[in-house]
Image: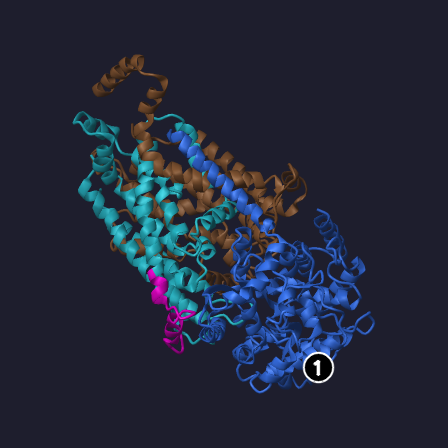
Chain colours: A cyan, B brown, C blue
């Protein structure tokens, strides 16, 4: 990298700082709303609360029907954790096959993979619901987790395929000459080298599963099984009194794990590559 | 290269001895090993539901009683007499073709800037990702109304320039654009993918270019962009598909009905309304297949064009 | 080998889907009659009852309190609670119905969704339980029982009854030096009255918060006052004329021009903002059109202000003085329930037990039974007491409540779209009425 001139660097820094303010504004606004008394949230629009209270946090944490947010966080972590493991294993296996192997009907299968990404979820929802109901999986975490072990989020397959294609084929061939089979090439060469894609998959799976609302609310009815996202929606009621303050307070709390996860893994994104060092 | 030639030779030798079935098995056994989990998922969780929805699209199905076969009625109604269908298609196309390029340009620009050479890099990255962490959530829905509403901050800001206040969220000619801004503002996901892609570019390419005296922009256009084309392509395809299927922004922020005056009636929102509030699952299934065809056409086009500009490592 | 096994898995799954899709119809009548009589012996058997309702954590507390007491009194019963928020509730319910997995007992808003569910053979008629005494309907208002009937069978019992009304801010009226509206005020008088209020209000404040034409209750009441209905009983045609619609829109358009109700754009913004922040809740409007059970929610936001409830304007030259519908959030039982007898007992407990209803109070509106109302007298919110008076007054001169027929949801959304076109000034009233009638007819004849 050539050395940047000081003016260029300073200008860039200031611009980034202004941009950062725009990016973070909603977070500050949420934080401020969560600290205002429930009745003030919509009366006082400014960022600085004139009266600070932690009531929303206590009231929100209580949750509903005898289950606190401790339960909801635990449930979210179970679903998210297992989803990440499932996606990483199943999607990387399929991606390796599509990127590096030659097999019959490859084009057709690739097209089918895309088809499964393109069809709107609403219409496969009912058949899937009927299937999971027959298996007696409704009101368990299984409908949310098991599909991830069968690579149903084809988005990640495609992501990994694109990354594997960026890895020089010479590396595979060298390994093959050394006597490595496909399983070894996959586990010793491709998997470590596509670490950026692995990390990206982990980050996205975390965030999307954490925030995914639709399938969670269809399959989890009992508050014992509610995730954080479901509990947040539960605070609002269009026909009566909504608990906005509690909703904002718990939204802030629910961002903390995602944020920590993102920061930790994006570090990995940078450092991971430096050590493997593609030539 | 040598190994490959050897393999091919031995394969040729084997062909003569083995039956066709055996050959098929040998060719595919390794791939099958890698593909089995995905294949099971594809068949059970995607293909069967897809076939079911294909069947339903030719029926009248109210979700309670048996589907009634109606042939092509749903499709004919959709394409000839449903004005809201046309409107929803228009809204979605606008959202896709304005929103996605904006979002990708933001994502790419910031990924390049935040790749290296700025103080506090990882802090900035995290902050620029914040909007995407929030997602189209309930909190954002409220915020958007406070920003773009009649008494919103945007109006306060514009009044400095003497622009008359307007309720940007409730004006049918601008409401869609507030959602497009939301899309462009939540550029975190493609940005992270770009960043990951940038990491994969070997640094020695830049070093040798510097020795040849290449400037910042030469490097961007001669190294970064060509090396990144597979990732650019990926982001383009995925964001296009995502935007076509956009639902939550309209459902949560647009107030579930697609108003005002259907100006935020996304295709998938209309589909949802048909399916779950008007109990016309057959009709909704037909809509899903039309959407699939539209997305497939655009994606297919992108794949065709990709041959001209996407470079893979060979 | 492998292929064949895979194929058989595929076929089994495909089959299981079609079976599930049919099964909502295969539940035949005789089987269910048998189950009604054999339950005596199963009395002490442990049962699980799934109970779903809409609400928020505050309302969930009320439900849980009642259900906990019931569990304590009936140790063999375990109630699985499935609360959700209003908007999500209906999506989940229809998915569960399609999957043949409805909760044993669940809430149903009759005016909106009653017939969509009653007509589809997924809800258990309650008549046999009333006959054998499991469910008690003594002391219930006839109108409320009728609201839960479909084709002469009783399907639903009210958790409460509410009526679309005008909630108003008395303190604000006092500040303006204007008397409260007289009871039974007519449309013409109401127009003059609100215009008078508007003249005294500063810019940015409104006599009425929001636009009554943006929701369907106004036109439905207007049609009923003229002797019609929103849709005909068979759901095949509209229950009012183009002239009715034009006169209705003209009435409100006049008030829109006078500034009594906000412009189309401002109303559109209002309709999607949270209740806490709308004009009425922030003290910037005198009236708001809402079901009267919501008055106490607004009282909470407007602490320091006194609120009151007025019935919707009446019509003196129509067929009926009032056109209000009883809006009934009711409780129903799934036809596929395997614990019907126990479920019926729980329903009876929930709507009739004096202890349970004392906890529930007027959460979903005024109870539809006299003994329960008497029992509540001392514990009700003053606004609920006012609501009872309005309800008594209204019931004197309205036609019977007609649950909207199946298919009405689609027509409602068409109506709202054309009404908004008028409010935005994008269409003339004549053109919009013509367009609405054309599109609605097309939808109804599908």
Q: Residue at x 44, y 52 (%)?
A: A136
* Quadrant of the rendered image containing residue A27: bottom left
Which quarter of the rendered picture does the N terminus of chain A lie within?
top left
Q: Is residue A68 magenta?
A: yes
- Give neighbour class at mark 1: few <14, some 14-19, many 20+ (Cα, 10 Å): some
Horizontal and vertical percent for residue B298? Answer: 49, 36
Q: Which residue is mark 1?
A: C181
Horizontal and vertical percent for residue A19? Answer: 36, 56
**Residue lying furthest front:** C41
Q: Which residues are magenta?
A: A48-74
Relative placement, left or right, of C5 versus C307 is left
The chain to which mark 1 is attached is C
Q: Up-down: is B137 above or below A133?
A: below
Residue C202 seen from this side = yes
Residue B91 seen from this side = no
Q: Is residue C432 magenta?
A: no
């Amino acid at each position: 990298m050539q050395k940047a001139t000081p003016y260029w660097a300073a200008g860039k820094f200031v611009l980034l700082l202004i941009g950062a303010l725009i990016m973070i504004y909603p977070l500050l606004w949420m934080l401020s709303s969560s600290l205002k008394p429930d009745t003030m949230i919509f009366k006082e629009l400014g960022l600085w609360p004139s009266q600070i209270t932690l009531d929303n946090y206590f009231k929100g944490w209580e949750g509903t029907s005898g289950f606190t947010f401790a339960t909801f966080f635990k449930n979210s972590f179970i679903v998210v954790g297992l989803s990440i493991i499932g996606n990483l294993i199943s999607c990387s296996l399929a991606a390796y096959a599509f990127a590096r192997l030659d097999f019959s009907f490859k084009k057709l299968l690739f097209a089918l993979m895309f088809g499964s990404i393109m069809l709107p979820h609403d219409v496969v929802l009912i058949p899937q619901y009927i299937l999971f109901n027959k298996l007696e999986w409704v009101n368990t975490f299984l409908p949310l987790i098991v599909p991830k072990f069968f690579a149903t989020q084809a988005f990640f397959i495609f992501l990994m395929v694109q990354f594997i294609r960026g890895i020089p084929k010479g590396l595979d061939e060298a390994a093959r000459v050394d006597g490595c089979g496909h399983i070894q090439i996959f586990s010793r060469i491709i998997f470590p080298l596509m670490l950026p894609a692995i990390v990206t998959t982990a980050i996205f799976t975390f965030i999307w599963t954490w925030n995914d609302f639709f399938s969670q609310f269809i399959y989890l009815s009992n508050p014992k099984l509610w995730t954080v996202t479901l509990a947040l929606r539960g605070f609002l009621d269009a026909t009566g009194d909504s608990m906005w303050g509690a909703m904002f307070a718990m939204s802030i709390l629910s961002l903390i794990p995602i944020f920590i996860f993102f920061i930790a893994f994006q570090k990995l994104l940078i450092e991971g590559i430096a050590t493997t060092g593609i030539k | 290269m040598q190994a490959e030639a050897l393999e091919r030779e031995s394969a040729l030798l084997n062909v003569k001895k083995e039956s066709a079935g055996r050959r098929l098995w040998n060719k595919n056994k390794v791939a099958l090993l890698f593909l089995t989990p995905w294949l099971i998922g594809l068949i059970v969780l995607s293909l069967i539901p897809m076939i079911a929805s294909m069947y339903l699209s030719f029926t009248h199905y109210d979700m309670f009683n048996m589907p009634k076969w109606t042939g092509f009625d749903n499709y004919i109604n959709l394409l000839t007499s449903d004005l809201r269908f046309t409107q929803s298609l228009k809204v979605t196309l606008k959202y896709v073709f304005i929103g996605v390029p904006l979002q990708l340009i933001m994502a790419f620009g910031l990924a390049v800037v935040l790749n290296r050479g700025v103080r506090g890099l990882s802090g900035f990255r995290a902050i620029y990702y914040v909007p995407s962490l929030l997602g189209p959530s309930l909190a954002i829905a409220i915020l958007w109304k406070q920003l773009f509403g009649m008494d919103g901050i945007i109006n306060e800001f514009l009044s400095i320039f003497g622009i008359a206040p307007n309720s940007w969220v409730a004006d049918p000619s601008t409401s869609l654009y507030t959602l497009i801004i939301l899309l462009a503002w939540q550029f975190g996901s493609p940005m992270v993918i770009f960043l990951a892609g940038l990491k994969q570019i070997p640094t020695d390419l830049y070093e040798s270019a510097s020795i040849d005296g290449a400037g910042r922009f030469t490097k961007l256009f001669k190294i970064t962009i060509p090396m990144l084309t597979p990732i650019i392509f990926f982001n383009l395809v995925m964001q296009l598909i995502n935007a076509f299927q956009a639902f939550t922004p309209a459902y949560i922020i647009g107030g579930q009905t697609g108003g005002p005056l259907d100006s935020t009636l996304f295709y998938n929102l209309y589909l949802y309304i048909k399916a779950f509030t008007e109990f016309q699952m057959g009709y909704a299934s037909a809509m899903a297949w039309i959407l699939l065809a539209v997305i497939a056409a655009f994606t297919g086009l992108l794949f065709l064009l990709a041959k001209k500009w996407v470079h893979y490592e060979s | 080998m492998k292929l064949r096994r895979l194929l058989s898995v595929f076929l089994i799954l495909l089959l299981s889907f079609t079976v599930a899709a049919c099964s909502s119809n295969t539940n035949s009548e005789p089987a269910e009659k048998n189950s009604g009589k054999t339950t005596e012996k199963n009395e002490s058997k442990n049962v699980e009852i799934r109970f779903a309702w809409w609400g928020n954590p505050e309302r969930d507390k009320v439900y849980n309190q009642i259900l906990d007491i019931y569990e304590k009194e009936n140790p063999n019963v375990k109630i699985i609670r499935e609360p959700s928020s209003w908007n999500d509730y209906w999506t989940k319910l229809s998915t569960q119905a399609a999957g043949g997995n409805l909760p044993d007992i669940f809430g149903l808003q009759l005016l909106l969704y009653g017939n969509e569910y009653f007509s589809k053979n997924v809800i258990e008629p309650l008549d046999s339980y009333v006959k054998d005494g499991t469910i008690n309907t003594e002391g219930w208002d006839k109108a409320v029982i009728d609201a839960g009937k479909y084709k002469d069978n009783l399907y639903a019992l009210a958790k409460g009854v509410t009526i679309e009304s005008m909630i108003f801010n008395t303190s604000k009226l006092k500040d303006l030096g204007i008397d409260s509206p007289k009871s039974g005020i007519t449309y013409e008088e109401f127009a003059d009255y609100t215009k008078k209020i508007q003249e005294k209000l500063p810019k940015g404040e409104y006599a009425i918060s929001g636009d009554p034409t943006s929701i369907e209750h106004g036109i439905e009441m207007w049609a009923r006052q003229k002797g019609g209905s929103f849709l005909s009983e068979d759901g095949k045609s509209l229950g009012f004329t183009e002239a009715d619609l034009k006169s209705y829109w003209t009435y409100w358009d006049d008030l829109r021009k006078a500034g009594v109700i906000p412009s189309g754009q401002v109303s559109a913004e209002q309709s999607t903002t949270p209740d806490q922040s709308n004009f009425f809740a922030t003290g910037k409007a005198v009236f708001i059109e809402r079901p009267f059970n919501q008055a106490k929610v607004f009282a909470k936001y407007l602490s320091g202000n006194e609120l009151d409830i007025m019935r919707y304007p009446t019509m003196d030259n129509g067929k009926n003085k009032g056109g209000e519908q009883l809006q009934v959030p009711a409780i129903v039982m799934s036809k596929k329930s395997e614990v019907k007898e126990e479920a019926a007992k729980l329903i009876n407990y929930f709507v009739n037990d004096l202890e349970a209803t004392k906890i529930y109070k007027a959460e979903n509106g005024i109870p539809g039974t006299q003994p329960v109302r008497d029992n509540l007298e001392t514990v009700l919110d003053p606004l609920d007491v006012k609501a009872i008076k309005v309800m008594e007054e209204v019931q004197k001169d309205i036609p019977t409540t007609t649950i909207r027929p199946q298919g009405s949801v689609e027509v409602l959304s068409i109506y709202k779209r054309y009404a908004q076109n008028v409010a935005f000034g994008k269409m003339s009233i004549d053109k919009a009425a013509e367009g609405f009638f054309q599109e609605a007819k097309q939808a109804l004849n599908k």
